[in-house]
Amino acid sequence: MRRFLLAVAAPVLAIVFSLALVSVILVISGHPPFGVFRDMVNYGFQPRSQVLTLNLATTYYLSALAVAIGFRMNLFNIGVDGQYRLAAMIAAAFAGSVVLPAPFGQIVTIAIAMVVGAMWAGIAGLLKVTRGVSEVISTIMLNFIATGVVAYLLTPGRLAVSVQGSNNIGTKPIPASGQVPGISLLPGTTQQVYGLILLAVVMGVGYWFLLGRTRFGFDLRATGRSEPAAVASGVNVKRMVLVSMLLSGAVAGLVGIPQLLGASYTYSLDFPAGLGFTGIAIALLGRNNPIGIAFGALLWAFLDTSRQILDLGGVSKEIVTIMQGVIVLAVVIAYELVRRYGLAQQQREVGRRLAAEESAAAAAGVAA
Amino acid sequence: MSVTELTNKTRGAAGAMPWLANRWIRLTVFGVGLLLVMSLVRLVTGAGDLISSGTVGAAVGLAVPIGMAGLGGLWSERSGVVNIGLEGMMILGTWGAGWAGSQWSAWAGVLAAVAFGALGGLVHAVATITFGVDQIVSGVAINILGLGVTQYLSAIAFTGKAGGGPTQSPGIKSMGTVTIPGFSSAMGSIENHHWFLVSDLAGVLKGVTYQVSYLTIIAVLLLPLTYWVLWRTAFGLRLRSCGEAPHAAESLGVNVYKYKYIAVVTSGALAGFGGGFLAIVAAGIYREGQTGGRGYIGLAAMIFGNWRPGGLAAGALLFGYTDAMQLRSADAVHALLLLAVVLLALLAVTYAARRKVISASVMAALAAVILAWFLATSDLPQQVTYMTPYITTLLVLSLASQRLRMPAADGLVYRRGEGG
């Protein structure tokens, strides 16, 4: 019971703390905090907003999962951003130009995205195992290079056509047979949840199974914890680095796919960017745990959806970005404080018992 | 590395050519060789921008913010704290510069940039040192916070001001530049003769002396200053010992917390200074998204430079140079291909001389491919030239021999009295 309380205490403490801090900022800038929070909650829990939140969370979840695979192996894949953008663009170009019968088109599109993501991440993996280049640098550079490659390919005459009725350009629209229909999950709104939310669930279960229930996963976590120990037990570290980078990239390749096949049907200039960095924050928030990440993704998506109402009240919506940053920081600090408190409690307990034994022994000695 | 190993290594390098033993001689030879190759390539391709005073000047300007972010990373990581939050601290710096620089003076902007950056560093220090949380988590949080706080403050502080808005500040007052009278123009006239090598050297000299910002001078001075403080003083030794073996340092009476705090706050101040440079000198205005990931590139430059000031300066300059090239002329980037061919061929010859057959043939093959590319095309699409600095960094890093070693206790949580 006490352990459970301690475990729940940290996230609750963190959220209370960030709410308090944001309230202070709001009061200073002349807005009533409770009114702002009430507006956000009211708006965020409307059926339409809930669907948007779920859709956003699907994307965030995949991104965070990709980052988390690297983290468990002690690899920092900052490159999820470039990996998913390149993968989504190439998959979109394929799905827009090649028409396959219904389930195959989608499956091939998804497979292409995974392969492209894996290959882009694989460059970093290969450079690390053969040339010892830190994956932190190589993935940062690969992000920028991916921007260039996408810009190069996404020009009229190569993979892009102009989007009708605007000066936007994008890949050829994906025909209906290649799309993934949405699910009408919630009553009271015509907005549909991405059909590929199921893909995110499958990936989450797969992540849990692969890391927690297989030899490979054990080796991966062992290598992440202590490389010398893993080497001593016969793990081929170089192979593990390459494989986990490929896996991370393959999942990263999926990040843009739910939106691509479920809503936008084309990769255009305004396709969402920067999801890879959100993924880092959410992976850290969920402590690389598949369920923790799900909560993190939902919270993040809820905040992102409900911030849209703030402009109406004249509050600048960047307050939510501040709140997200504070939550990330406050959660880890709260975990650390709770851990220290738990440790101190244990030590006190041990001390009390020892003292009791000692005094009992002393009493026995006096009696003798 | 033990002392015997070290002397053996020096002897090894000096064995073939004894005069190469001195590091400064080696660097000079390398520099002159590079200049020679570059002027040759300029002569062959006719791409004047490959090594002109304009390119050099622009390269230095582009290298400064990256170098300052990298230097910030160096301070922090030398004390054992990984700082992925440099980007956020830089963003805070750009905002500080825009806020103070637009209403008082450019120098007030510099101070505010440094102060705002240091504030970001302080948050990182409190989280990682006092509370002992994961350093990457804290850094990521600071990047988010830096963005959120500046956007929020911009909406309040800049909306409605002349030239300002929710995403940008009013213009920052100008700071002025330094030119060495006589010398710069003399160098300029030599450059205009386009003599082989001599004009190129003059171009480089003019580039680093003509209309140089005060902040550039300060930034360049900060590099040797950092070297001196961290490697030549007792303070620096103690600070670095916190990054190598904090518990050993503790046992010798070093207050590890204090040194880490100093290092991380300094780190934030330097990153903020880099951000301030972007706003005050490079743009003359604060604009949202101005840093464009330069904090991350600074971090890369620091790793590139093996956690040393000289190396990180080289990394920042390499990046600044190729960036300047792609901004200034596509022809020069095309000429850069030929430069890459020559350098790769030289590398192949060196490997062959050392009987490293595989490495030599890989280099030779790469050189051949790029040569074919150079000959087959006459220019490069703009999207490809955009990638130049990033590809170059990646290539150089994978070709350079990997002797990188980060501080031993970098990224580890330290708690007083918990040494094993």
Image (cartoon, coloured by chain):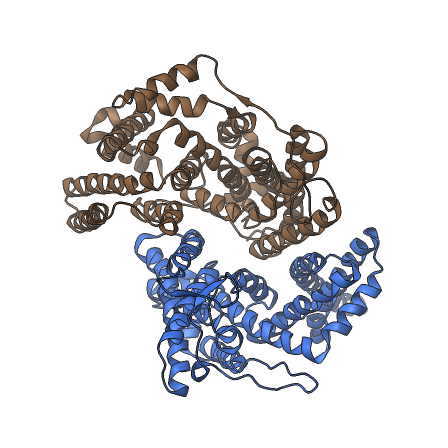
Chain colours: A blue, B brown
Q: Nearer the viewer, residue B224 or A367?
A: B224
Q: Is residue B70 above or below residue B19?
A: below
Horizontal and vertical percent position of residue B84: 54, 50
Q: Is residue A49 above or below residue B218?
A: below
Q: Nearer the viewer, residue B242 or A193?
A: A193
Image side of residue B218 versus residue B92, left or right:
left
Q: Is residue A168 above or below residue B318?
A: below
Image quadrant in which you'd find residue A314: bottom right
Q: Residue at x 28, y 26 (%)?
A: B32
Q: Is residue A190 above or below residue A346?
A: below
Image side of residue B218 versus residue B203, left or right:
right
Residue, far front: A165
Residue B253 in sight here: no
Q: Nearer the viewer, residue A322 or B328?
A: B328
Residue A304 in sight here: yes
Horizontal and vertical percent position of residue B367: 21, 46
Q: How many marks?
A: 0
Image quadrant in which you'd find residue A277: bottom right
Image quadrant in which you'd find residue A358: bottom right
- The N terminus of chain B - image quarter: top left
Horizontal and vertical percent position of residue A183: 57, 86
